[in-house]
Amino acid sequence: MNKYLAESNLIKQIVESGRDIDTQQFATISELMQDKQHVIKAHELAPDGVISYVYPLESNEAAIGLDMLENKERKKEANLAKETGEYTIAGPYELVQGGTGSLLFDPIYTNDTNGEKIVIAQS
C-alpha cells in the first residue's frame, strides 16, 4: 500500500510542479516504478477524469478514453476523490481491459492560464 501511494505521489509532484509530461515520459517513469511482482498492473493518468496515459499500454489499450468521473462503476469514488482532494481506493472492479482489480483515485490539481483549477485524477 505504501508503495502504491508513493508512486502516486511522485506522479502528482511532477504534474503539480507544472512540468509537461508526454506519453513517452509517463511510460519511462512508470516503467521505473514497476515492481517485479507486478502488484500494480497499470499506471494511469486522467486529465479532466479521462484516461489519456496508461502504462503498460500493451493489454491496457481499452482503458484509454474512459471517463472515470462519468463511468457508472467508477464515478462515485472518482468524484469523491475530486471533491475531497483526498485519494480513495475502491474495488474490486471489472476492468475495461479485462480482469478484476482495485483502483486508487488520487486527485491532482493544477492551474490553467486563467487561474482556474483543473482536476487530473490518477488511478
Image (cartoon, helix red, strand yellow):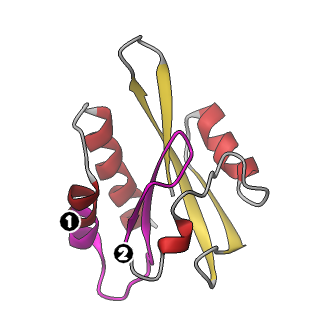
> As displayed, is residue 85 above or below residue 23?
above
| Res 56 label | 2
| x, y percent for residue 123 | 51, 58
Q: On the rendered structure, is 113 left or right of 61?
A: left
The answer to which image quadrant residue 90 occupies is bottom right
> As displayed, is residue 30 above or below residue 48?
below
Residue position for label 1: 28
Q: Amino acid at mark 2?
A: Pro
Which label's residue is closer to the chain start, 1 or 2?
A: 1
Residue at the image point whose x is 36% and y is 66% from the top:
3
| x, y percent for residue 5 | 42, 57
SS for dot 1: helix
Distance in Å between CA atoms under marks 1 and 2: 10 Å
Query: Between 1 and 68, which is closer to the camera in this rendering?
Result: 68
Query: Between 68 and 100, which is closer to the camera in this rendering?
Result: 68
> Does the magenta-highlighted stretch encompass residue 53?
yes
> As displayed, is residue 117 above or below residue 87?
above
Q: Amino acid at mark 1?
A: Thr
| x, y percent for residue 66 | 60, 58
Q: On the rendered structure, is 52 left or right of 13?
A: right
Q: Which residues are magenta?
A: 29-57
Q: On the rendered structure, is 74 left or right of 61?
A: right
